[in-house]
Image: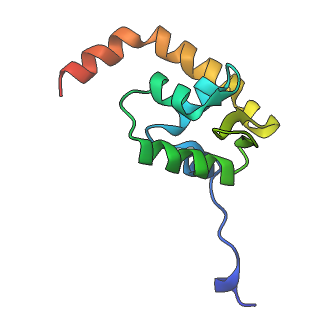
């Protein structure tokens, strides 16, 4: 194995954003932090997201172990999404992000109105 075969080290922030970044993932995680939700509940909470995008984001979060999907064997089929223990470890991050957004809301509104 020469030096070019070594795995590249990725900054933890970059790696974290690869997993939870994007427009919808952190919002999904936020809504699931309040407890399990069905697909249509999430759609109602996020009316701007398309069904296709929500499905894609849920699958990616599930693939990374952030959420789990539970399928109930009943008619009609019932599927619930919830945070895993690993996903729940993001709650303090959400709390800090919420506090930061609250503290700086006016500044963010001013800056977004300039564009």
47 displayed left or right of 45: left
Is residue 84 or residue 77 the one in the foreground? 77
Residue at 78% in and 39% down: 86
Query: Quarter of the image holding residue 67?
Result: top right
Give how far across and how far down residue 107 sits, in percent: 34, 13
Give how far across and how far down residue 25 sits, in percent: 53, 39
Query: Quarter of the image holding residue 32?
Result: top right
Is residue 43 depicted above or below 86 in this figure? above
Give how far across and how far down residue 88 sits, in percent: 75, 31
Residue at 64% in and 84% down: 4
Residue at 60% in and 51% down: 59
Q: Looking at the rendering, in which quadrant would you find the C terminus?
A: top left
25 displayed left or right of 53: right
Residue at 47% in and 37% down: 24
Is residue 40 or residue 22 the one in the foreground? 40
Colour style of the rendered protein structure? rainbow
Is residue 104 depicted above or below 93 in this figure? above
Q: Looking at the rendering, in which quadrant would you find the N terminus?
A: bottom right
User: Which residue appears farthest toward the bottom when viewing the image?
Assistant: 1
73 displayed left or right of 38: right
Is residue 65 or residue 77 the one in the foreground? 77
Query: Quarter of the image holding residue 76?
Result: top right
User: Which residue appears farthest toward the left when viewing the image?
Assistant: 114
Give how far across and how far down residue 68 sits, in percent: 73, 42
Marker count (numbered): 0
User: Which residue appears farthest toward the right when viewing the image?
Assistant: 85
């Amino acid at each position: 194995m020469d030096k070019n075969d070594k795995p590249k080290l990725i900054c933890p922030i970059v790696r974290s954003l690869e997993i939870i970044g994007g427009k919808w993932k952190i919002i999904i995680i936020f809504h699931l932090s309040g407890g399990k939700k069905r697909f249509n509940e999430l759609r109602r909470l996020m009316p701007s997201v398309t069904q296709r995008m929500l499905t894609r984001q849920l699958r990616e979060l599930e693939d990374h172990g952030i959420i789990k999907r539970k399928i109930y064997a009943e008619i009609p089929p019932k599927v619930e999404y919830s945070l895993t223990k690993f996903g729940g470890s993001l709650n303090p991050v959400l709390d800090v992000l919420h506090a930061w957004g609250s503290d700086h809301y006016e500044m963010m509104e001013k800056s977004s109105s300039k564009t």
